[in-house]
Image (cartoon, rainbow, N blue to C red):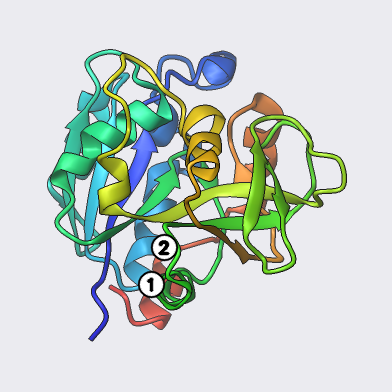
Amino acid sequence: MREIPDVIILSGGFGLRLRGVIGATPKPMARIAGRPFMELLLRQLKRHGFSRVILSVGYKQEVIREHFGEKAFGLQLIYSIESSPLGTGGALREAARHIRTKTALVMNGDSYTDADLKCLVRDHARNKADVTVVVIPETRSDAGSVALDHNGRIKKFAEKRLLPGSGCLSAGIYILNKNLVGTIPTVAKISLEEQLFPAWLADGKSIAAFLFEGPCIDIGTPERYHKAQDVLEKVESGSVLESDGGS
């Protein structure tokens, strides 16, 4: 039986671009159709059969913890707290001490992509990759752009800019081997996308792509947050979760 990976949700950012819309509310708690955005991610994980989630939190982490507690939607929740900003790579390094499985699913806490996460886990194991990244068709210029080789492996990664001819963006969902996390430098702040992915590629690590043809909906700007209200209104609702047998 294949091991179910632990999950890390990177959700420690300040959400400065959303302050004019959500005030001092931490971004994972921004309301989508009356629910905290984080709820959508947790329900999605439950629906796909995950059971143990590490929430990497920082700004106003107590608000998140008081709302969800140690268990929500049948998931065990563990909190990894950033006392100061560590970047996505540093946050991953700190959260990794809680991982009990050989691989971990890593998600950004401000975006939703309805990829088949079970299939992602299977593909990662079958391809024997060090990292597998969910990629989507290119739709915007301020996300991680990736270039693929003829085998569908990532050969170049550029954060928040487009690579000529790439056609693909990172959806901010990754599955990686736990031993790789141990190689992250213990510096004060480091970016997974801007520094670690390029460094791992340069070091010969195998980074596979998992193509998902649907959109990645993020709430990082006021415009995208307002758009998400309609797009995600009924996503991962209680009735959908119940019909999928995941309550």
Quick one: which residue is furthest to the bottom in this view? 1
Image x and y of residue 240, in percent: 46, 73
Residue type at mark 2 is Gln
Quick one: which residue is furthest to the right in this view? 165
Residue at 71 percent of width and 56 percent of height? 148
Image x and y of residue 242, in percent: 36, 77
| Any part of residue 32 in sight | yes
C-alpha gap between disc 2 and disc 1: 6 Å
* Quadrant of the image containing the N terminus: bottom left
Residue at 39 percent of width and 66 percent of height? 238
Camera-side residue of 180 and 34: 180
**Dot label at residue 48:** 1
* Quadrant of the image containing the C terminus: bottom left
Q: Are marks 2 and 1 in contact (CB under 8 Å)?
A: yes
Residue type at mark 1 is His
Residue at 64 percent of width and 32 percent of height? 159
| Any part of residue 65 in sight | no
Image x and y of residue 73, in percent: 25, 61
Label 1: element kind: loop
Camera-side residue of 174 and 240: 174
Horizontal side of 63 relative to 48 (left or right) equals left
Above or below 103: residue 95: above
Circle 2 is placed at which residue position? 44
How crowded is the residue under tag 1: few (<14 C-alpha within 10 Å), some, or many (20+)? Answer: some
Q: Quadrant of residue 182?
A: top left
**Dot label at residue 95:** none
Image x and y of residue 57, in percent: 28, 30
Horizontal side of 26 relative to 155 (left or right) equals left
Horizontal side of 169 relative to 174 (left or right) equals right
Above or below 175: residue 192: above
